[in-house]
Amino acid sequence: MKIASYNINGVKARLHALTAWLEEARPDVVVLQEIKSLDETFPRAPIEDLGYNLETHGQKGFNGVAILSRLPLEDVRRGLPGDDGDEQARWIEALVLADTPVRVCGLYLPNGNPAPGPKYDYKLAWMVRLKARAQALLAAEEPALMAGDYNVIPQAEDAANPAAWATDALYLPETRAAFRRIVHLGFTDALRATTRQDGVYTFWDYQAGAWRRNDGIRIDHILLTPQAADRLVTCQIDKEIRGREKPSDHVPIWVELED
DNA sequence: ATGGTTGTTTAACAA
């Protein structure tokens, strides 16, 4: 089973880029972030016509996540538990009904800039809630993964120019420590487990020629429970997508799991 | 230090 994550940066503006990639890459399951769309204005038909079941968790103007799946979905859950007052659409999960069912969680972790400040406080609080959900996933002892835009640069080798990010919410020591506290519960970072080389990025800013200069960062991650990691075949990044017309500033990352 | 770019939406905000 091929499971991908893609921060699409506006699904309506990116519809052609998305459908072209779906037809080429043919993932079985996709989690999208930053759909920037309400559920009722999400362009469903072009995606359903490609054979995908579609579940959205939208919001007007920004944020918003979705799950696309060629396989049936059940037990769809919207919103990260732990704060009923949180209005931001950043979490969706579902059980994918394959021969061996896999729980797929899609997340859009808060950016947190500027730090320090209330946005950074929200990011760190959200990561505490994410840790709680992650612990529950591990306790279930089932194949599961959490995929998405984590807005976390885990280590210096995950940025072309780490010094430029020194005071950024994506790279502050407290951010990276919070990410490690989740990974070290027992998750496998799929890209790190299958790729030896550094300089593998998933995001290049639109500004200042970042793509042309390969001034990227690795912030889109797929974390696997042990039962999913046992099935991990490969993890890849579709870097070439970033050089196309009207691209998102992120590219897809995907894993292949044994059926 | 600052600016640079894009999407959603029309004046900024978020990234």
Image: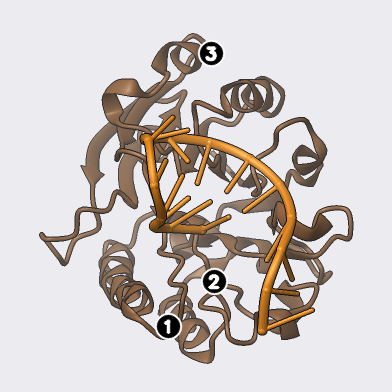
Front-lying residue, A207 or A175? A207
Quarter of the picture holding the N terminus of chain A: top right
**Chain name for mark 3:** A
User: Label 1 crowding class (10 Å Cα cut-off): few <14, some 14-19, many 20+?
Assistant: some
Q: Quadrant of residue B3?
A: bottom right
Q: Quadrant of residue A252?
A: top right
User: According to the image, label 2 marks what residue?
Assistant: A152
Q: Amino acid at mark 3?
A: Leu
User: According to the image, label 3 marks what residue?
Assistant: A50
**Chain name for mark 2:** A
Q: Which chain is brown?
A: A
Tell me where residue A6 appears, x and y as whole percent.
56, 43
Q: Are marks 1 and 3 on the same chain?
A: yes
Q: Earlier in the sequence, mark 1 or mark 3?
A: 3
Q: Which chain is orange?
A: B
User: Label 3 crowding class (10 Å Cα cut-off): few <14, some 14-19, many 20+?
Assistant: few
User: According to the image, label 1 marks what residue?
Assistant: A178
Tell me the residue at 80%/65% (across/down). A215
Q: Earlier in the sequence, mark 2 or mark 1?
A: 2
Q: Amino acid at mark 1?
A: Ala
Tell me where residue A150 appears, x and y as whole percent.
49, 63
